[in-house]
Amino acid sequence: MSDIDWDALRDRAVEMTARAYAPYSNYPVGVAGLTADGRMVAGCNVENAGYGVTLCAECGMVSELHATGGGRLVAVYCVDGRGEALMPCGRCRQLLWENGGAACQLMTPEGIQTMAQVLPQAFGPENLQQRA
């Protein structure tokens, strides 16, 4: 998909940082993704006093993806409170792999990369099917 509006994705991700609940880290994160059918889905981080149950922004975005009809992510842009591109954590890279696959494009601090580049040799559903 060559007609990805990266500026619109960034703008939506920045908007989501204002909705983040980050009273402990004071580090708001927003994310926006484009689906294969052209929808835009988004999320923000939601912290919790029990740090282990804090939700990353990508978790919220993937929840919105499934709540609004599912499908596949084709492009994702994650930002910090200054609007700068962020590299998703390992857990979130796995979420993006599961919901976008190897070809999903991700804006990173070093530019656009595919999920295959940011999560090489990823483990996915096909691995479970091979073992079943």
Image (cartoon, grey):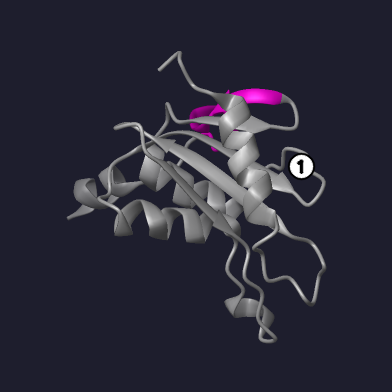
Residues in magenta, as a range: 111-120
Q: Is residue 111 left or right of residue 71?
A: right
Instruction: Determine crowd level at label 1: few under 14, some 14-19, many 20+ residues with C-alpha closer than 10 A.
Output: some
* Residue in view at x 63 percent, y 78 percent: 52
* Residue in view at x 66 percent, y 74 percent: 47
User: The N terminus appears in which quarter of the rendering?
Assistant: top left
Q: Is residue 70 left or right of residue 25?
A: left
Q: Position of residue 122 (x, y in %)?
A: 46, 41
Q: Nearer the viewer, residue 96 or 118?
A: 96
**Would residue 75 be counted in the magenta stretch?**
no
Per the image, label 1 sits on a secondary structure element best described as loop
**Would residue 112 be counted in the magenta stretch?**
yes
- Relative to 67, residue 41 above or below: above
Q: Which residue is mark 1?
A: 83
- Name the amino acid type tagged 1: Gly
Q: Nearer the viewer, residue 40 or 76?
A: 40
Q: Nearer the viewer, residue 66 or 128?
A: 66
* Residue in view at x 68 percent, y 32 percent: 108
Mark count: 1
* Residue in view at x 79 percent, y 77 percent: 24
Q: Position of residue 101 (x, y in %)?
A: 39, 36
Q: Position of residue 78 (x, y in %)?
A: 64, 43
User: The C terminus appears in which quarter of the rendering?
Assistant: bottom left
- Relative to 52, residue 9 above or below: above
Q: Position of residue 121 (x, y in %)?
A: 48, 36
In the current view of this chain or complex, which residue is farthest to the top? 2
